[in-house]
Image (cartoon, rainbow, N blue to C red):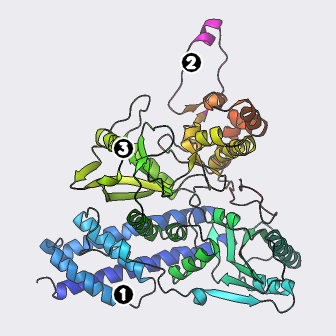
Amino acid sequence: MTAGTPLAGECARQIVEAFSGYNSEFRAITRRAAGRFEARDWHGGQADAVERIELYDRCVGQTVARLRLLLGEQACDPALWGSAREIFATEIREQPDSQFTKTFFSSISRRLFGTVGVAPGLEFVATELDPLAGIDFSSITHAYVNRGSLQLLVEDILGDLRFRCPWIDFERTVGNVTSGIVSGLRAAGAQQAVDRIELIRPVFFQSTRAYVVGRVTAGDTVRPLLLALKNTDQGLIVDAVMLDENDVSVVFGFTRSYFHVDLERVGEAVAFLRQLLPRKPVSELFTVLGRAKQGKTERYREIVTHLDRSDDLFAHAPGERGLVMVCFTLPSLDVVFKLIRDRFPPPKTVLRQEVLDKYRFVFKHDRAGRLVDAQEFKRVRLPRARFTDALLEELFSETAGTVHADGDDLIFDHMYIERRMVPLNLFLRQAPADAAELAVLDYGQAIRDLAHSNIFAGDLLLKNFGVTRHGRVIFYDYDELCQVTECRFRDIPEASNDEDEMRGEAWFYVADNDVFPETFINFLSFDDAQRSAFMRVHGDILTPDFWRNVQQRVEAGEILEVLPYHPARGPSSGPAGG
């Protein structure tokens, strides 16, 4: 058989069927979320989250293996794949979210061919795919019109939620939600009564909470609306009512675990959310809805499009140079690029594979709003002329095993791309005293939140944390990261004599997993006021008892909640903590 014959058609058909199988399984896992929420089966929900994340690579790998058997020696025949691509595009034309299907095809062809950069004849190029083009989201939303009583409208909304668990006090909940909406609109300066509330039909699930997502219209004022639902031992309550864009953006942030929401047409939900959160990149909206691969495709498209519209140069990212990573950015673009160095100087003893494993661990773990979502990219092509000389020199000397010159371009075999933040150490030097103190306190809260999700950052230096535009402190350096349950938190033994106390090194045995929380403060470059604020609020973090208590609770199977909002206080006035 040759290209253009039934073999190309069979190749296309198998990929269509493989994607259909993947999508069906993805939605089946997603649909379990409602039952997990009703049964308060949080551990089952965590297992579902990992299973769904691993699903894409598993399905791509299985499909590649089947196609190698089917195609034999023609498995890497460009002419055959060009023909299969055309047939595939025709077969999926009427499918919902057809761009997802094209991304799946590209994943398979790139893995087979080891594609560097892009190969337009073998895949669907990201810059040509617009998943939101011509989308009308009206089919996934339902509008509740105010016919004279906001309370009755809210009663209809809550009454339409079908959970197999009762409300603790339905009438009181209706009243609380009603007053929360009124308060949120008043804070936004709305002068008129609510006209309508429009909601995405399916409920969103994340960790231990369910969310009703939509928008409220009051005259000329349109605000996002997010209701956070909690299922307690006694029954359902609405834990928070949010109408502020910043509050809602944190819930849909790039530091949270992905939502489980059963959507037939994901693009429609993204288009609706884009209107609620216009400053959030489309790539992050796809990702937070669980479509991580499509999110990567969109991020690549955003980067390439931005390169075409800008002329600034890639340069070292602000902040101290890392011992494990080379970090660079384009000043006009809100992302940072991270490459693992070929060699790590002392005192680093970690291996490259261990760094890769840490990033994969974080990808699957509950990020609890404190770990940045680092997207892994392979064989990326970028124009060499867009790099500063200083950055080029470091790339060729420190990452020569990963970065290669190819004509006018650079080829990056492997990199991570993540949202850019202001390094905390730089933020504290530049910020006004009150903003710096808030960041110091949120840094302490970040350590707590990570601990409650069974994460010990390992390296607590301020340079390893960043500050978002919402003022939240996020951890982004994973090479020393480990689980709290893997550590042994110890008190510093008392010195038996003055000579021991004066030694520069420990006079007692220290194992690899030993941690001494009392020493943390020695590595934090706070000024006196910042140190005082930290000790006042978070002094217990510097005690082994805090960490041992967290260990015991985690090992006992307790779920320690880290919420992206302040419970039972409606729109928050600052960064949400744990």
Can you see residue 442?
yes
Can you see residue 374?
no
Mark 2 and mark 3 residues within 8 Å of each other at the beta carbon = no
Instruction: Indicate whether 576 appears above or below 317.
Output: below
Q: CA distance from mark 3 to mark 1?
A: 43 Å
User: Camera-side residue: 406 or 157?
Assistant: 406
The residue drawn where x is 38% and y is 79% is 101
Q: CA distance from mark 2 to mark 3?
A: 43 Å
Q: CA distance from mark 1 to mark 2?
A: 67 Å
Q: Given this view, does label 2 or label 3 mark the residue nearer the observer?
A: 3
Look at the image and give the residue range highlighted in magenta. Answer: 489-511
Q: Position of residue 69 (x, y in %)?
A: 20, 73
Q: Earlier in the sequence, mark 2 or mark 3?
A: 3
Question: SS at mark 2?
Answer: loop
The numbered mark at residue 391 is 3
Question: SS at mark 3?
Answer: helix
The numbered mark at residue 92 is 1
User: Camera-side residue: 427 or 148?
Assistant: 427
Q: Position of residue 163 (x, y in %)?
A: 71, 79
- Asked whether, in this view, residue 386 is left or right of residue 434, the answer is left
The secondary structure making up most of the magenta span is loop
Q: Earlier in the sequence, mark 1 or mark 2?
A: 1
**Label 1 crowd (10 A; few <14 / some 14-19 / many >=20):** some
Residue 350 lies in quadrant? top left
Question: SS at mark 1?
Answer: loop
Question: Residue at label 2?
Answer: 508
Instruction: Indicate whether 410 appears above or below 273.
Output: above
Q: Position of residue 289 (x, y in %)?
A: 54, 71
Q: Amino acid at mark 1?
A: Ile
Q: Amino acid at mark 2?
A: Phe
- Asked whether, in this view, residue 55 is left or right of residue 199, the answer is left
Q: Amino acid at mark 3?
A: Leu
